[in-house]
Image (tube, coloured by chain):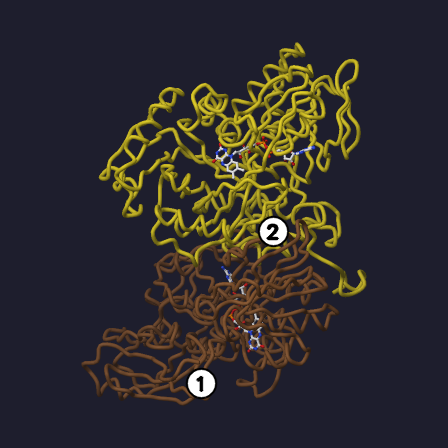
Amino acid sequence: MRNVDILIIGGGPAGLAAAISAYEAGSRNILILEREENLGGILKQCIHNGFGLHTFKEELTGPEYAQRYIDKVLEYGIPAQCDTMVIDITPDKVVTAVSRGAGLEHFKAKSIILAMGCRERPRGSLGTPGWRCSGIFTAGTAQKFTNLKGMMPGKRVVILGSGDIGLIMARRMTFMGAKVLACVELMPFSAGLKRNIVQCLDDYDIPLLLSHTVVDIAGRERLEGVTVAEVDPKTLKPIEGTEQYYECDTLLLSVGLIPENELTTMAGVKISPATNGAEVNENLETSVEGIFSCGNVLHVHDLVDYVSEESAKAGVNAHKYVQGQLPKEENTLEVVSGFGVSGAVPQHISQELDEPITIMFRPRGVFKDAQVCIDVGDVQVAAKKSRILTPGEMVTLKFSPEYLRKNTNADKITVRVEAQQS
Amino acid sequence: MIDVIIIGGGVVGCGVARELSRYNLNIALLEKTDDISNGQSKANTAIIHGGYDAKPGTLKAKFNVLGNKMYDRICAELDVPHKRNTSLVVSFGSDGHEALEKLKQQGIENGVPGLSIIGQDELRRREPNIGSTAYEALLVETGGIVCPYEMTQAYAENAAMNGVNFYREAEVTAIEKTQDGWKVISKAGTFTAKAVVNCAGLYSDVINNMVSEDKISIVPRRGEYYIVDKKYANEFHASIFQLPTKMGKGILVSPTVDGTVLLGPTAEDIDDKMDTRTTTEGLAKVLKYASLTWEHIPMRSFITTYSGLRAHCNRDDFVLGEVPDAPMFFNAVGVESPGLTSAPAIAEYLAGMIADKLSAKKNENFDPIRKGIPKFREMNDEQRARAISINPDYAKIVCRCETVTEAEIREAIRRPVGARSVDGIKRRTRAGMGRCQAGFCTPRTVEILCEELHISPLEVTKFGGNSKYIESYLFEKGDNENA
Ligand SMILES: Cc1cc2nc3c(=O)[nH]c(=O)nc-3n(C[C@H](O)[C@H](O)[C@H](O)COP(=O)(O)OP(=O)(O)OC[C@H]3O[C@@H](n4cnc5c(N)ncnc54)[C@H](O)[C@@H]3O)c2cc1C
Ligand SMILES: Cc1cc2nc3c(=O)[nH]c(=O)nc-3n(C[C@H](O)[C@H](O)[C@H](O)COP(=O)(O)OP(=O)(O)OC[C@H]3O[C@@H](n4cnc5c(N)ncnc54)[C@H](O)[C@@H]3O)c2cc1C
């Protein structure tokens, strides 16, 4: 059994940033385990630009952004073992991993950082009726085929769901000579970033059909076409008579991401039903002492810059924990998602903080001229105006810890939206 | 000349092949599609039925009860996952007692052991999560669950080990009587044989009608399903049927041997024997009825939906045995539910009859034992370490949802009657059957298929035919390989 101070699972942007910050805080016995052959996580296949605007004030491609972190990891000499998959974690932090080179290994960690990223929701989870033919891919799988394998999955494409990966793939498939017929979204608003809608759909005249869905899939062997219908925005049920058939050989799904938390569950960590990620406190520590979680495995982010920022915090706190400098959380308040809010992170905040606190969440719909508010107990302590809020863009809001000390008898912190829902 | 040709590679055809391989016979199995277990035997409810349901005196009743009894032995010999988890037929409401009693009597008449009616308390003790209106139930102690495609594969592999030749993409298009047997014309060539066994499932009527004046007709009867994530593996223990009422036959909720939960099936007669589509109405019906048994179905935890077609015969029973006006031509026609349960008994019965007619001798080298592909997910640490030291491909996890390694995938392709497509790998290893439904592993599975079968990615299919994944290379092939 190898002893490690900080064991990081996943070598994507989250794991890399956590490793670097832990090193910079002073830790020297760090190990990154990554199941793929190379570091970089999902960014390896994101060859479009638009990464790093916040962090580096430059527009980088995914691989370029990842490389900056990989270079730092190499410079610091932080060991990263690739081609190694973690298959088990126990609550007392014994980690089991397998690799071709080393076989089955056990590690005893003082602290663990979970940075396993997320996976895409498949067609099966939607229950879309029709044939179960080939030609239906999640957008990320198609992205892997085109960007990493140099293979084209098809030529006439419909995209179901308007998540960012779907939008990016609409443009990629167009570049590669495919005809993208439409991007179909069930909700009356897109799940993706505004800039991706403009740059990936509008610029190529690809229609975005809001309040529409795929109601039938045709093709006994390879996909031959899909039937798209309008849905009632209230009930989300298809409206009869609005069906339209699109002849296509490829259907890409961009219908949501699910944090990859099998290992988290094995470690006995409490999972939040709202985010499908671990419940954490403001230190990004989970319900199991010394186990931290960050990046897309904690909650799905839309910008990698925020992943890096959040994960750096997890790295520093893991270092502090190993040094015995992370205060034990005793008096914590629960963070409650109020009106218009879904999946606020962190879920628990200590009353004895002395740094500003950041809360992140996704709006539960589209809100115009809205205000996001935080209440400690019944007292509003922070508010931020926003011209428009959409579920596609994560909202971050900070507040000063002094309000916690002022309201010592408060029993919870509420995040909520004040607006007319449109 | 071949001794016996078996038409159809479902559980019945592969079972007959295996039982016939106990004899010194030259046997060939012809399957239409690119893989065995592609018909009813892949998409069904996977229940080992007790045998209370079929009308006394029918072949269904007889072979169901016989087959049920054989399962433990066959599954032990062939290393097939199965479990006697019991079945419950639940009455929702207090007016079902008489009907339950009737079912029980029918079962007793069919020779089913271990039947009893249990009340509220016992029912809820066994199934604490059952719906609030569940009132009482028929307990079927011999009821069980099995992995139907592994059962079929196991039969096929064992048959191949014992000398049966399998031909796939070998659809039989015509059969002619010859002086001393039959000429069978297929897409894989023309064969002559002394005896032919028709195990063609939904098309067993077509095959029968090629040789007999006694015409049969099979109507495809569709059943649709949802599969729920393994998270809910312990929600229910027994396979829970609903007592049929005026409202319908009810929908079953059952655990599977893989730990997922099945909801279904519907029953709808259709025209097209290939139409395995799922439909909005069908799926809605599944949910509506299943929610009696499972009141809070976790809608966000569905991993997939599917449908299967039952080969419903207009004679309303199995048609088994030699065709009266076609000597040495044997039928296994209309083998719909409980056909999976009955398959071991049907296979033994037909094989015995055919061997007899051919005066075949025992095959002294027959080996009844087949071992499944060692599954990494079922090993303990010590076994895992050993597996990796022998074959490092065991350290490479390709399907992360179901923890399937590259070693297992390669073996699934290399085995006798091995996988040739992505779905073939999926059924043999579970790679791609988990919650991400192959999103993550498909690109790698495609590569492994190419390496093992020496084909290009452009030729890899999901399930044969034109079910391809890749339309073209983005670069010239040479560039691609350098990249
Ligand atoms: C298609 C797409 C387009 C995007 N576009 C943009 C954009 O334009 N701009 C932007 O800012 N952001 C974008 N993002 C978001 C950004 O890529 C993600 O937020 C970021 O990659 C998440 O980082 P992560 O480290 O949490 O997860 P990942 O990048 O997924 O990394 C997780 C790593 O953990 C490894 N791992 C998982 N489980 C195990 C295990 N058991 N053992 C060992 N290793 C394991 C995985 O192999 C992976 O390398 C995009 C994302 C996608 C998918
Ligand atoms: C929805 C549903 C639910 C069921 N549930 C249960 C259950 O819970 N328990 C139970 O015991 N039974 C159940 N059954 C029944 C059981 O699945 C079948 O009885 C059994 O699988 C039949 O096997 P088979 O080999 O006869 O047919 P199949 O598995 O259909 O095999 C027939 C094969 O013949 C091939 N073929 C067809 N035409 C030709 C040709 N011209 N040339 C060559 N090959 C050809 C086909 O491609 C196919 O592979 C269910 C069936 C269905 C459809």
| Mark carried by residue A405 | none
Give left or right: position of A326 versus A69. left
Where does residue B136 sit, x and y in percent of width and height? 27, 37
Give the position of the N terminus of chain A as an image quadrant: bottom left
Q: Indicate the colour of chain B.
A: yellow
Q: Quadrant of residue B96?
A: top left
Residue bearing the label numbered 2? A131
Q: What is the three-letter code of the residue carrying label 1?
A: Lys
Picture layout, residue B297 above or below residue A119? above
Total numbered badges shown on the rendered structure: 2
Q: What residue did someone put label 1 on?
A: A368
Q: Which SS class for mark 2? A: loop
The answer to whether one can see residue B475 in this image is yes
Q: Which chain is brown?
A: A
Q: Residue at x 62, y 43 (%)?
A: B424
Mark 2 packing: few (<14 Cα in 10 Å), some, or many (20+)? Answer: many
Residue A405 drawn at (x, y percent): 23, 86
Quadrant containing ligand 2 reads top right
Check if mark 1's residue and mark 2's residue have beta carbons within 8 Å. no
Residue depicted at 46% across the width and 69% down the height: A30
